[in-house]
Image: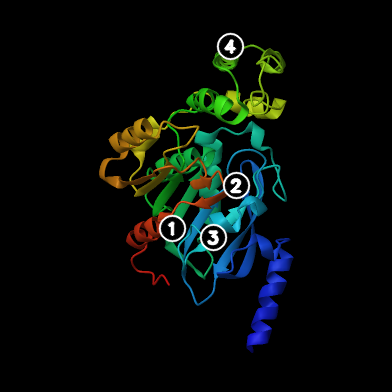
Amino acid sequence: MSTAAVRAERRSRVAATGSRRSDIHPRFGAVAPFTVAWAGGTLAGEVLLPRGAGPHPIWLDVPSAGPATRGQCTPRWQAMAPAGYAVVRWDRPGCGASTGEWTSQTIAVDRAREVLAVAGAVRTMNVIDKHCLVAAGFGEAAWAVLAAAACDSIGPFPLLAGVVVISASMRYDDREERRLRIELPRRFGASAADVEHAVALFRRQLRMIRGGAPLPVVAGAGRGRAGTRGYDGRFGATAGELDYASRNLELDATPLLAQIHCPVLALWGTDDVYTDVERTEAGYRSGLRRRLTSHAYPGADHRLCIRDADAGIAATVPGMERDVARWSRRVAPRVSLA
């Protein structure tokens, strides 16, 4: 086939998935769509195939929080996958072309099954190296990949060769209070009294959920009551999101870490408003021991960016892609990574 014909075929395959070329990192030359039937409905996604012959190791880019679609996996996050890896991305249940409802999921069970269902489906493709599947999750999705790895370790034929967790926390219910204490004064100029008021309201909502209060009542307890911007738009901003939060409120990474047998790469920014990085890294180290490789980047935020306040721009922390590539070469040693 001529070079022009190959390029035309690649363009048609990209168009067939509904993806825009601007959504895809330049290192990928073809897109293979897929659908997966699982207990929660049907998941629709695509495999971004690198240029060159396979079989390719796989990087599962697990959708993060909220109503996420595959297009939200930006080229920046795709670039985290080392050269030579194919990237798998998909629409969360009830989003894009996937059926079901993400707000009815639990992270430790439903989202873990979602990850393993996709891993099981794409590993049957003849251009994929089925022995080299890595699942990567950012923020909330970090728990999903940890839960998937813990479940995967139980079976006789594990699907995952390793997992990458980015800006991971230990407990689900710790994140919002920390954000309120750091972000409200820093971003919204809230006074110390307003911050304490917001924290008290958040704790009240937690007590109401744990006490079995109806969710509309819980939502009304916090809406418009904190006296400062930045409170209403996060925890339980909508009824569906509050339902989802209530289902996952007691989620804790600690028991998951002890069950994981595969290598884990954990990346944090020390300026993360959601996570006490030093304490969280110590907890991950205690649970994973030598299976853990970790990096905490000074001055980087939740999205692993360092912001230049004067210039008004944010750039990916230097050295992150190098650290990911080094770890990935140990996980997929048989694959020639360009």
Label 3 to label 4: alpha-carbon separation: 42 Å
Q: CA distance from mark 3 to mark 1?
A: 15 Å
Q: Name the residue located 52 percent from the left edge and 41 percent from the top edge.
A: 141
Specify which label sits upstream in the sequence, 2 or 3: 3
Q: Is residue 322 left or right of residue 140?
A: left
Q: Secondary structure at mark 1?
A: helix
**SS for callout 4:** helix
N-terminal of the pair, mark 2 or mark 1, is 2
Q: Residues within 10 Å of mark 1 (few under 14, many from 20)?
A: some
Q: Amino acid at mark 4?
A: Arg
**Residue receiving disc 2:** 312
The residue to which callout 3 is attached is: 87
Nearest to the eye among marks 2 and 3: give it: 2
Q: Amino acid at mark 1?
A: Glu
Q: Nearer the viewer, mark 4 or mark 2?
A: 2
**Pointer 1: what residue?**
321
Where's residue 218, x and y in %?
66, 15
Q: Secondary structure at mark 3?
A: strand
> Which residue is found at the position 67% from the left and 63% from the top?
22
Asked whether disc 2 touches disc 3, contact meaning CB atoms under 8 Å apart, the reply is: no
Q: Tell me: residue 112, above or below residue 123.
A: above
Image x and y of residue 305, in percent: 50, 47
Q: Nearer the viewer, mark 4 or mark 1?
A: 1
| Whole-percent x, y for residue 227 in the image | 67, 16
Q: Earlier in the sequence, mark 4 or mark 2?
A: 4
**According to the image, label 4 marks what residue?**
204
Dot 4 or dot 1: first in sequence order is: 4
Q: Quadrant of the C terminus?
A: bottom left
What is the C-alpha distance between the residues marked 2 and 1? 23 Å
Crowding near pointer 2: few (<14 within 10 Å), some, many (20+)?
few
